[in-house]
Image (tube, grey):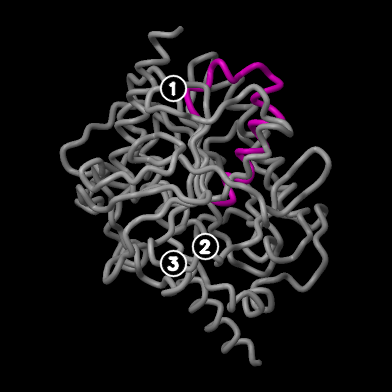
Amino acid sequence: MNKALKWLLVIVITITVIAGVVAASMRPIIGYLMTPDYVFSAQLAPAAPDYAEQTSWLTLPDTVDYADMLPEGLVDQQQDAPVDVFYIHPTAYYGNDNWNSNMAPEKGAAQIIDYMVAAHASIFNGCCKIYSPQFREATISTFLSGDYGPLELAYSDVKRAFEYFIKHQNKGRPFVLLSHSQGTSHAIRLLEEYIQPQGLVDKMVVAYVIGYEFPTDKFSRGLSDIAVCESAEQTNCIVSWAAYGETSDSEFSFELPHWYPEGWEVNKGKETLCVNPLSWHADNKMQTRDEHLGAVLSNPLSFFYENVLFDKNTGTSPQYLQVHKNFTRAQCKNGRLYIETQYDNSIAAGTNENDQNYHAHDINLFYMNIRENVANRIARFKIDM
């Protein structure tokens, strides 16, 4: 295969991944096109970010960034917010020149991350100061390779960033942990390896660790001091879900690696956590559209090619984040969150009829429910202090 054709296939597959999740049949192609042609070595990785430098942060409360985005009618209150958010972004690096991203701002991965910050982190600008670090994320093919060295390297950045955040930025304030996809793989480990041992659970309002099928054996094998969120106002607890269409194939799954003190394990065959974001209960009860406060439907491609999301130079904000109320019902079953099967919108774009994995939209599907919920949990946290 010539180089031009190979890169054309890379672009096509990358767009498909952004819009949804590549079907299981695409795995061999991803493995070929997106895997570096050398064995991972930390010595060959890009230079580590310095978290004392502003450029090592995607979002900060006092900078103009994509976390400042707002649907019409909402207000950014970061300036006076009493709580912080630490957001760990999902995979955006699909390259094969290195096992870990070099975080170059001119690369396509940076555009994908900006989009995710707008769709995820902006939910919290009404309650919290938002901190989100750059980190040398592992390339997408790492999850198929069986060599988790790139994930170890990425996690080392996340941990250093969080340590810097706690020491120099947070300064003892309550905080919320937010993550998605690869970010959640690092967040779960951070909870177990740092937040819990350092006695920070009492300062953590809630952990929204979304889109990376959370194995429930984590609670008996390491997270003994952190509970599942069982109500809309409970604090010091964990929320997690992964969204699929109601008519999807229940047998469709990805084998996702998780870190344990004993070594890495995949989630195959394990029970997974699902907290319904329409009720905030970890049960199997169907929640109707009436409980859905609003999804933000957004198309990543219009952001990349039309530049309509945010003008960093002028601070202008086109009405790109459009809220759609009463968008879907939702029900947890067998560790998955099932929503109404989507057709002819940006949620459905690129998904396979069988898997209907709405991974790229796990969070923005419930934009307004999360925005209300975090405010309620913070209010309860203040009462209980």
Picture disc at residue 197: none
Q: Position of residue 83 (x, y in %)?
A: 42, 21
- Residue type at mark 3 is Ser
Q: Earlier in the sequence, mark 2 or mark 1?
A: 2
Which residue type carries mark 2? Lys
Q: Position of residue 326 (x, y in %)?
A: 21, 48
Give the label, 3 or 1, closer to the camera.
3
Precedes in sequence: disc 3 or disc 1: 1
CA–CA distance in space, label 2 to label 1? 40 Å
Q: Is residue 58 above or below residue 11?
A: above
**191 in the magenta segment:** yes
Say what secondary structure mark 2 lies in: loop
Q: Residue at x 37, y 45 (%)?
A: 66
Residue 67 appears at what percent x and percent y?
37, 40
Q: Nearer the viewer, residue 67 or 181?
A: 181
Name the side, left or right, on which 296 lies relative to 252: left
Q: Earlier along the polypeptide chain: callout 3 or callout 2?
A: 2
Q: Which residue is mark 1?
A: 234
Label 1, secondary structure: give it.
loop
**Relative to 356, residue 378 above or below:** above
From the viewer's perspective, tell me whether residue 362 is left or right of residue 96. left
Q: Amino acid at mark 1?
A: Gln
Q: Which residue is mark 3?
A: 248
Q: Quadrant of residue 233?
A: top left
The x, y position of residue 113, in whole percent, is 47, 53
Q: Which residue is mark 2?
A: 107
Look at the numbered disc 3 and give the secondary structure of its residue: loop
Crowding at mark 1 (Cα within 10 Å: few <14, some 14-19, many 20+):
some
* Numbered disc in front, either 2 or 1: 1
Of residue 72 and residue 326, the one placed in the foreground of this image is 326
